[in-house]
């Protein structure tokens, strides 16, 4: 098959928008290698054609006998990866690496053999890709975030490692439907959405990111995908010629304004893009204003703004939809003008218009690969630096191999601005929230290291424990046996793990101090009556005063909530004078050491704390969840102390909290503790408006069931001629689970509105 057209022009037998799928005519294995080499040579005359053909043959022989899950010869995978990268017009070393990227991991070839045949550069790149592959093959319990951190490190050594890995993942995702085990398909799709798609976006490879997300969305949310696709098909059927009509109309308006137009292309947005906007903006399908988007290509930057003026003059502007990414490019270098307008003569269609130059379009589609230094001469490289300063750092890494390792420490983790990454003396990577201190670092290494911390060296020099860490810092923690956490640390640590550990220690110490003080006070009360004190003689008081145990009784006395003489009289009733009625409520125990904050004894606790996964409570607290806002794991929460009821957990955004503003001492700082078992079922309340027919309600319940949401109760709040308003209490795992249910409901026909009840 002849290869013609733009870098994406040879797409064949692949989804619309797929990248670099080379369709080859039947022939010998050598023909495939020669076709690939010829393709690379067509855009880079400096290509080492022999090296590519030799790499293909080495890979084919190395993978001889190996097959993919669908039975195809394994060589088809590295060939497809190389073809994808050829679509980005990458250099010989990258194409050779793509062909050989699985040989070290899956065959008998070694890096030494590859280096002898193809040179040190290819061996280094293959080694980088192999390391990433081994990370994926680790235990499935390995946290994805850890994979991501190590992936970024590998990327920073040479951006081409990441490009090969992204192409490898793209082909694996394209063939995901061939994987037999559903759980493996789900794992690969989740990992792709959470790690590889964001990485592709960060380096500007928009077309690759879009395809990854589209395929994985279909795997992870099949019901939402089918529903949105069906709605798109319906709209397309209603106005099959709408895109063509608007394209022609745009062209006429721009030509009339003397704007030279190189290309106008319209499209419907992807199902995933639509679902994401419905989810993030909390709107219904019909409320989206940019289901259709039109791209206008003009010769230069000045014409971009001229085209924008012509569009705004011709159509009514949708407020809040204009964005100027030309004067202020995105961090990945993306430049374009975006605006939203209404086309009244086309059934009041709301559309998005993107205006850019050919160079901007190339960056938007190919990202960093659009400026690849190996396809340019010295003058071209300098021009790239002037036009796209954001790429300079990456090009410096490639040009100055000797300085790459030094530069790595400064650039390796710019992808996540909300995190800081530091090293242990052994070179292990530790990820922390931005603003973290050596104390946070110590607790991230191990809880016992944090407890025993007495000092820290940052990059070899003693520094204060409260000093914020920077990306690339090497941190050495100095410990002392027997040391305990300093309560003052809680004022400057930022990581949840450090805060929780310090709070637990402070609470435990306060509890122990209260227990000792209470025991001493009780013993003193007994001695004043001439009695010898022992735990056994005080046992009757435990039951009489409704405490769960003797220690809790001592803590209540030590906190000043039960008088020592009340214990004496409860243990030895004959010493009591006239019977005194106890407090109307039960004796109270302290809440997290805060003056005035109280909770009821444990006998009223409905379930053990671990069942809720709530941190910040004294052991034995009675806990309940507010019926006004129904918080679930992932919500910001606050605890409210209520005499006789214990602690009620509210969503931090609950409107009823204003009624407690006059009694701030009743507020308790609490949070979800996933490690303590917050993975059970929690009840969330939804307000749903549906069409007034049985089919809509049935569709709603089916959609909830398919998303593993269990209906606990369903109540019709209001019914009118054309709609019904319902309240649904739904069992979900956490906020993420709930958000998925809501998004699916919003995409379900017959459901007009879905909101979460927050009190």
Image (tube, rainbow, N blue to C red):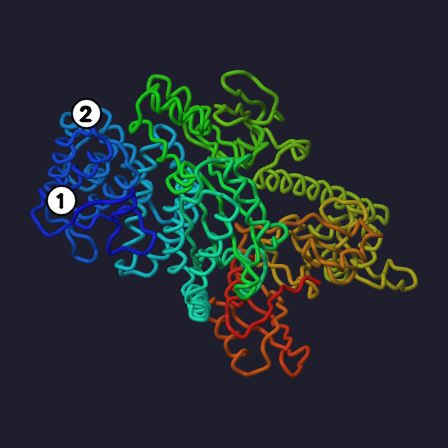
Q: Nearer the viewer, residue 135 or 554?
A: 135
- Of badges 1 and 2, the one in the foreground is 1
Q: Is residue 481 above or below residue 502?
A: above
Label at residue 213: none
Of the image marks 1 and 2, the number of the one nearer the N terminus: 1
Relative image position of residue 656 (x, y in whole percent): 76, 60
In the displayed structure image, the side of residue 747 where residue 147 appears, left or right = left
Is residue 204 visible from the viewing direction of this image?
yes
Assess whether mark 2 and mark 1 are in contact (beta carbons under 8 angstroms). no
Relative image position of residue 444 (x, y in whole percent): 51, 35
Write the residue at 82% across / 50% down: 564
Relative image position of residue 298 (x, y in whole percent): 45, 41
Label at residue 32: 1
Label at residue 119: 2
User: What is the total number of numbered labels drawn onto the structure image?
Assistant: 2
Q: Is residue 161 above or below residue 741?
A: above
Write the residue at 22% across / 24% down: 120
Circle 2 packing at 10 Å, graded few (<14), some (14-19), many (20+), is few
Circle 1 packing at 10 Å, graded few (<14), some (14-19), many (20+), is many
Relative image position of residue 669 (x, y in whole percent): 69, 47
SS label for mark 2: loop
């Amino acid at each position: 098959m002849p290869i013609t057209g733009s870098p994406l022009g040879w797409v064949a037998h692949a989804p619309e928008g797929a990248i670099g799928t080379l369709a080859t005519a039947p022939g010998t294995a050598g023909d495939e290698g020669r076709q690939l080499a010829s393709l690379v040579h067509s855009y880079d005359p400096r290509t080492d054609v022999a090296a590519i053909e030799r790499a293909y043959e080495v890979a084919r022989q190395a993978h001889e006998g190996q097959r993919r899950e669908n039975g195809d010869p394994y060589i088809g995978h590295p060939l497809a990866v190389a073809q994808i990268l050829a679509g980005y017009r990458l250099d010989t070393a990258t194409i050779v690496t793509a062909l050989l990227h699985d040989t070290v991991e899956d065959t008998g070839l070694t890096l030494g053999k590859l280096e002898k045949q193809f040179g040190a550069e290819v061996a280094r790149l293959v080694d980088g890709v192999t390391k990433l592959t081994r990370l994926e093959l680790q235990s499935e319990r390995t946290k994805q975030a850890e994979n991501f951190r190590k992936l970024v490190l590998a990327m920073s050594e040479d951006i081409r490692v990441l490009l090969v890995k992204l192409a490898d993942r793209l082909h694996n995702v394209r063939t995901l439907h061939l994987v037999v085990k559903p759980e493996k398909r789900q794992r690969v799709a989740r990992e792709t959405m959470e790690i590889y798609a964001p990485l592709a976006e960060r380096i500007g490879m928009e077309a690759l990111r879009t395809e990854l997300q589209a395929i994985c969305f279909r795997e992870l949310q099949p019901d939402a995908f089918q529903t949105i696709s069906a709605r798109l098909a319906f709209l397309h059927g209603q106005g099959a010629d709408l895109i063509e009509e608007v394209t022609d109309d745009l062209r006429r308006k721009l030509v009339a304004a003397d704007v030279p137009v190189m290309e106008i292309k319209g499209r419907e947005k992807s199902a995933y893009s639509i679902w994401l906007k419905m989810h993030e903006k909390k709107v219904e399908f019909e409320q989206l204003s940019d289901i259709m988007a039109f791209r206008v290509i003009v010769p230069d930057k000045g014409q971009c703004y001229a085209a924008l003026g012509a569009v705004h003059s011709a159509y009514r502007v949708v407020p809040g939809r204009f964005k100027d990414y030309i004067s202020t490019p995105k961090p990945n270098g993306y430049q374009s003008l975006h605006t939203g307008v209404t086309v009244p003569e086309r059934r009041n269609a709301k559309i998005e218009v993107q205006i850019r130059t050919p160079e901007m379009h190339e960056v938007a589609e190919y990202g960093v690969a659009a400026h690849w230094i190996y396809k340019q001469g010295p003058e071209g490289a300098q021009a790239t630096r002037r036009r796209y300063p954001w790429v300079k750092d990456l090009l410096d890494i490639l040009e100055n191999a000797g300085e790459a390792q030094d530069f790595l420490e400064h650039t390796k983790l710019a992808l996540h601005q909300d995190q800081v990454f530091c090293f242990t003396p052994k070179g292990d990577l530790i990820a922390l929230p931005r603003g973290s201190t050596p104390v946070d670092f110590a607790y991230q290494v191990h809880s016992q290291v944090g407890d025993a911390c007495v000092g820290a060296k940052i990059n070899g020099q003693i520094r204060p424990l409260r000093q914020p860490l920077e990306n690339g810092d090497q941190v050495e923690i100095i410990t002392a046996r027997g040391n305990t956490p300093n309560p003052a640390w809680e004022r400057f640590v930022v990581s949840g793990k450090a805060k929780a550990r310090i709070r637990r220690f402070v609470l435990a110490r306060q509890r122990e101090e209260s227990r000792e003080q209470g025991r001493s006070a009780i013993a003193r009360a007994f001695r004043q009556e001439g009695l010898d004190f022992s735990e056994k003689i005080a046992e009757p008081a435990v039951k009489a005063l409704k405490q769960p145990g003797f220690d809790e009784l001592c803590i209540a006395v030590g906190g000043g909530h039960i008088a020592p003489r009340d214990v004496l009289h409860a243990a030895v009733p004959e010493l009591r004078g006239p019977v005194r009625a106890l407090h109307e409520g039960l004796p109270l125990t302290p809440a997290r050491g805060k003056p005035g904050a109280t909770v009821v004894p444990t006998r009223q606790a409905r379930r053990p704390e671990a069942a809720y996964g709530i941190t910040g409570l004294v052991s034995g607290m009675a806990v309940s969840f507010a019926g006004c806002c129904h918080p679930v794991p992932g919500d910001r929460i606050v605890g409210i102390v209520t005499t006789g009821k214990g602690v009620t957990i509210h969503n931090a955004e609950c409107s009823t909290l204003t009624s407690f503003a006059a009694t701030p001492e009743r507020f308790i700082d609490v949070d979800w503790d996933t490690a303590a078992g917050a993975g059970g079922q929690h009840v969330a309340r939804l307000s749903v408006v549906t069409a007034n027919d049985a089919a809509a309600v049935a569709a709603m319940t089916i959609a909830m069931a398919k998303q593993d949401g269990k209906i606990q109760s369903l109540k019709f709040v209001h019914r009118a001629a054309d709609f019904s308003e319902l309240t649904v209490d739904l069992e979900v795992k956490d906020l993420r689970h709930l958000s998925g249910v809501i998004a699916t409901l919003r995409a379900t026909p017959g459901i007009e509105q879905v909101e979460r009840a927050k009190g």
